[in-house]
């Protein structure tokens, strides 16, 4: 049937004798694969990848002809260049290491918490072979995977028991599904959070089969609001960390201790969804205040859940700690198997938690805590060293060491500014946006933040080990030859 759409009409108009001639001049995939240069690429690259690259390059040339973007025969050299680029793109891992110069320690887009040396060593030692994931060496038979981290988790939190799932959203849903399906959960209206990735607590509640009973107002909720909401269908009182926002001014909220006392009076489960995962009092080590897992359990929470890749500084996972009888019920839930973690997570988590057995060791060896804890004097010292190296490599550019503020990120320490030190750079001849794009396109991508048309390199997430690659990346970006004029001229 004829295509009467405008697009079809345009396509028929473009299929002129000249267009047909141009299309016919394109080599076939098989012919191009026989070219000497393409055959060389096949020696070091999987043939299927090269074939796909050749096909993509020919398809790109064909599209350009049909769209009227090419009116001359496509040169073989240009087609080979397209193939080479396609091979490079397809052979480059999509998940790449980057330099984080944004100052956001727990940058969700960049993988949140970088792992400690101990966790990396544990992964290197255990990932390449077999391990005792579900094998009890003493008994010579199958064991349970979460036993590798339970003892350490209970030791550092003071909990009776613990279990691990693949993220904190799964932990929350599993708790709700186990204890509140077809029943009500009472939550303060001011804690019905929505965070990145479209996570909304009311939606998780609905998915679990529990009924949400919200109480209080956005800025003020009292213990009486919770008590008035309790009825025969109530299963749980829930406290939720605000994650990525703070309500300030005329506010009131119910502390977990008060909430737990009320829950126990009515024989209900008290749950604290802490999210961030601080294991001890951070203020003792010069960091901003953040509710701790140990503190929540000591206040009477029956179950506490939190993320492994936020303030804890480990791999992505969701950790649930609390009363043994409740943890056993969670682990007996059929959904537990769908949320379980693999050996890589457990290898990294065990090494991370082991560092917390000595808080002094944790604040120095866990990169997340070390970065948040860094003083402005330390950052300024690093900034001056980096500025000297940049000025030596790029004498025509101006780099200024300035004070600034940043945030922990990842939903941790919401609204609490971290005083920091940055190197401020306004590139010569191009906009900050253009330069930021060039930096992202480098061999080692450099991710920066932009403020007032200036590149800001935040030293909180930069270390001296990064400096050589950073200077090299900036130098390459400055000498980059753009084929298109900068938007701001």
Image: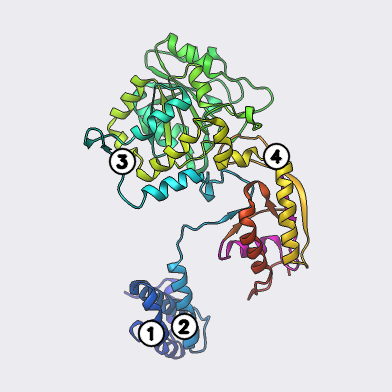
Residue 454 visible in the shown view: no
| Residue 79 spot, x, y in % from top left | 47, 83
Element assignment for label 4: loop
Query: Which stretch did the figure color magenta?
Result: 420-444
Element assignment for label 1: helix
Residue depicted at x 42% and y 10%: 266
Any mark on residue 79, and which?
Answer: 2
In this figure, which residue is indicated by the disc labeled 3?
133
* Disc with the residue nearer the chain's start (4 vs 3): 3
| Residue 106 spot, x, y in % from top left | 56, 43
Q: CA distance from mark 4 to mark 3?
A: 40 Å
* Disc with the residue nearer the chain's start (1 vs 2): 1
Q: Is residue 396 left or right of residue 237?
A: right
Residue 443 in which image quadrant = bottom right
In this figure, which residue is indicated by the disc labeled 1?
32
Neighbor class of circle 1 (other Cα within 10 Å; few <14, some 14-19, many 20+) is many
- Quadrant containing the N terminus in the rendered view: bottom left
* Disc with the residue nearer the chain's start (1 vs 4): 1
Instruction: Give the farthest residue toward the top.
Output: 265
Instruction: Give the farthest residue toward the front.
Output: 138
- Quadrant containing the C terminus in the rendered view: bottom right
- Label 2 vs label 4, nearer the camera: 4
Q: CA distance from mark 2 to mark 4?
A: 54 Å
Q: CA distance from mark 1 to mark 4?
A: 59 Å
Q: CA distance from mark 3 to mark 2?
A: 50 Å
In this figure, which residue is indicated by the disc labeled 4?
375
| Residue 295 spot, x, y in % from top left | 53, 21
Circles 2 and 4: CB atoms closer than 8 Å: no
Residue depicted at x 75% and y 68%: 429
Question: Does residue 226 sit above or below 124 in this rendering?
Answer: above
| Residue 253 spot, x, y in % from top left | 59, 20
Residue depicted at x 72% and y 61%: 390
């Amino acid at each position: 049937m004829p295509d009467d759409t405008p697009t079809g009409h345009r396509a028929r108009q473009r299929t002129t004798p000249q267009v047909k001639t141009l299309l016919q001049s394109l080599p076939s995939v098989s012919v191009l694969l026989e070219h000497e240069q393409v055959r060389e690429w096949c020696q070091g690259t999987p043939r299927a990848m090269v074939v796909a690259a050749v096909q993509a390059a020919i398809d790109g040339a064909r599209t350009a002809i049909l769209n009227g973007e090419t009116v001359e025969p496509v040169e073989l050299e240009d087609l080979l260049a397209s193939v080479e680029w396609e091979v490079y793109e397809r052979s480059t891992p999509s998940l790449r290491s980057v330099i984080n110069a944004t100052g956001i320690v727990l940058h969700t887009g960049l993988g949140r918490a970088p792992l400690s040396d101990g966790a990396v060593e544990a992964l290197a030692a255990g990932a390449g072979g077999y391990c005792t994931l579900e094998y009890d060496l003493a008994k010579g038979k199958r064991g349970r995977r979460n036993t590798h981290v339970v003892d350490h988790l209970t030791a550092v939190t003071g909990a009776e028991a613990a279990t691990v799932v693949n993220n904190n959203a799964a932990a929350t849903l599993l708790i709700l599904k186990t204890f509140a399906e077809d029943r009500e959960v009472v939550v303060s209206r001011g804690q019905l959070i929505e965070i990145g990735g479209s996570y909304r607590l009311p939606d998780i509640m609905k998915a679990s089969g529990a009924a949400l009973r919200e109480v209080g107002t956005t800025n003020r909720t009292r213990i009486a609001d919770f008590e008035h909401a309790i009825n025969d269908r109530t299963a749980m009182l829930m406290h939720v960390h605000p994650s990525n926002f703070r309500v300030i001014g005329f506010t009131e909220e119910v502390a977990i201790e008060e909430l737990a006392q009320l829950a126990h009076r009515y024989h209900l489960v008290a749950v604290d969804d802490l999210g961030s995962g601080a294991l001890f009092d951070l203020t003792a080590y010069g960091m901003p205040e953040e509710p701790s897992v140990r503190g929540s359990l000591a206040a009477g929470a029956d179950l506490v859940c939190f993320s492994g890749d936020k303030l804890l500084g480990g791999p992505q996972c969701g950790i649930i700690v609390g009363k043994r009888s409740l943890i056993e019920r969670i682990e007996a839930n059929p959904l537990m198997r769908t949320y379980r973690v693999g050996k890589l997570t457990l290898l990294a988590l065990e090494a991370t938690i082991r560092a917390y057995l000595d808080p002094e060791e944790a604040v120095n060896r866990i990169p997340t805590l070390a970065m948040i804890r860094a003083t402005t004097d330390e950052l300024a010292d690093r900034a001056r060293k980096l500025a000297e190296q940049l000025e030596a490599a790029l004498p025509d550019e101006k780099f200024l060491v300035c004070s600034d503020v940043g945030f922990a990120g990842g939903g941790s320490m919401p609204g609490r500014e971290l005083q920091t030190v940055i190197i401020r750079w306004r590139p010569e001849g191009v906009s900050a946006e253009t330069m930021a794009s060039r930096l992202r396109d480098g061999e080692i991508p450099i991710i920066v933040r932009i403020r007032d048309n200036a590149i800001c390199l935040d030293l909180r997430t930069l270390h001296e080990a990064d400096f050589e690659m950073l200077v090299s990346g900036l130098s390459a970006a400055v000498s980059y030859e753009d084929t298109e004029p900068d938007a701001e001229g």
